[in-house]
Image (spheres, rainbow, N blue to C red):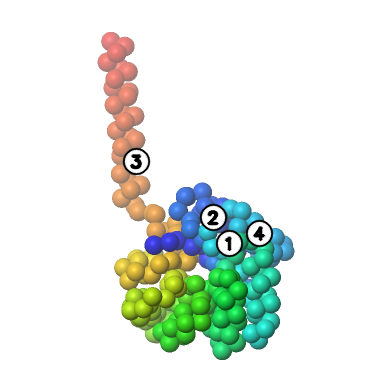
């Protein structure tokens, strides 16, 4: 499973990249708006830090405008993936952009039919929003399962990017279901690594080692 970070924070991206397990980054207008500075420069810097797809979302709502913005994002760096919202206009823009050779991540996916249409339009990634479905008492992970299942029946060259993951169990479930990618905040990535028994075990190893060294020193001086 590929691990993407869902942020536009350079600090957080550097921290995750240093772990050596970061495969890509997803941004959206909300995440870019939280950061200072020029979004284009931020995206370029993200592409320098991470060797993998970096999603940049369009904000136009008509197909022509989306395609125009998408071309602009894509021209910034070969790793940029154009993010389009899953609307009729987004579908048209996806068809145009994918025919031109640009990769599209169809975002705001909340149903299997939206994912199916996105793949047919040539999207390279679909982003089902798990947490936001959970928020409205609808099991978000069932959507991931449906999409993985449907895509498995055909030969769509489209990856399932489980998005809006809020905690490590979302990542575990997405991985169990065979989602190709999980995108998450840094807090979730860090929580995936943490285990109290690891900390306790390491402390015990180090304490025992120090004790043994002291005992050896006492023996060799007598
Ligand atoms: O990747 C989509 C993500 O940014 C949405 O996450 O937690 O705002 O639903 P959330």
Quarter containing the C terminus: top left
Which residue is most to the top? 222
Q: Which mark is residue 203?
A: 3
Mark closest to the chain's N terminus, 3 or 4: 4
Which residue is at the front of the view, 18 or 112? 112
Q: Is residue 46 left or right of residue 111?
A: right
- Find disc 2 in the rendering and name its residue: 51
Mark closest to the chain's N terminus, 2 or 4: 4
Task: State whether residue 214 is above or below residue 140.
Answer: above
Q: Are marks 2 and 4 in contact (CB under 8 Å)?
A: no
Q: Secondary structure at mark 1?
A: loop
Residue 76 % position (x, y): 67, 63
Which residue is at the front of the view, 167 or 171? 171
**Residue 27 seen anywhere in this rendered image of the structure:** no
Residue 71 % position (x, y): 66, 72
Q: Secondary structure at mark 3?
A: helix
Which residue is at the front of the view, 120 or 185? 120
Mark closest to the chain's N terminus, 1 or 4: 4
Q: Is residue 94 left or right of residue 180?
A: right
Q: Which mark is residue 44?
A: 4
**Residue at 67 percent of width and 66 percent of height:** 75
What is the distance, in whole Å, between disc 3 and disc 2 at their CAs? 35 Å
Q: Are marks 3 and 2 in contact (CB under 8 Å)?
A: no
What is the distance, in whole Å, between disc 2 and disc 4 at their CAs? 12 Å
Q: Which mark is residue 79?
A: 1
What is the distance, in whole Å, between disc 1 and disc 2 at their CAs? 8 Å
């Amino acid at each position: 499973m590929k691990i993407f970070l869902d942020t536009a924070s350079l600090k957080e991206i550097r921290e995750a990249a240093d772990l050596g397990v970061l495969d890509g980054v997803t941004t959206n207008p909300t995440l870019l708006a939280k950061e200072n500075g020029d979004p284009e420069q931020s995206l370029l810097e993200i592409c320098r830090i991470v060797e993998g797809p970096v999603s940049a979302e369009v904000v136009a709502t008509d197909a022509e405008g989306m395609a125009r913005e998408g071309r602009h994002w894509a021209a910034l760096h070969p790793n940029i993936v154009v993010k389009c919202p899953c609307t009729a206009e987004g579908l048209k823009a996806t068809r145009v952009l994918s025919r031109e050779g640009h990769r599209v991540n169809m975002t705001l996916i909340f149903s299997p039919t939206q994912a199916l249409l996105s793949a047919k339009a040539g999207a390279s990634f679909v982003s089902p929003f798990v947490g936001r479905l959970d928020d409205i008492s609808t099991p978000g992970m069932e959507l991931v399962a449906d999409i993985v299942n449907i895509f498995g029946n055909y030969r769509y060259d489209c990856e399932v990017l489980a998005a809006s993951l809020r905690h490590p169990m979302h990542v575990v479930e997405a991985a169990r279901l065979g989602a190709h990618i999980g995108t998450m905040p840094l807090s979730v990535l860090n929580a995936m690594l943490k285990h109290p028994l690891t900390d306790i075990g390491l402390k015990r190893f180090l304490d025992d080692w120090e004790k043994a060294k002291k005992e050896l020193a006492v023996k060799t001086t007598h």
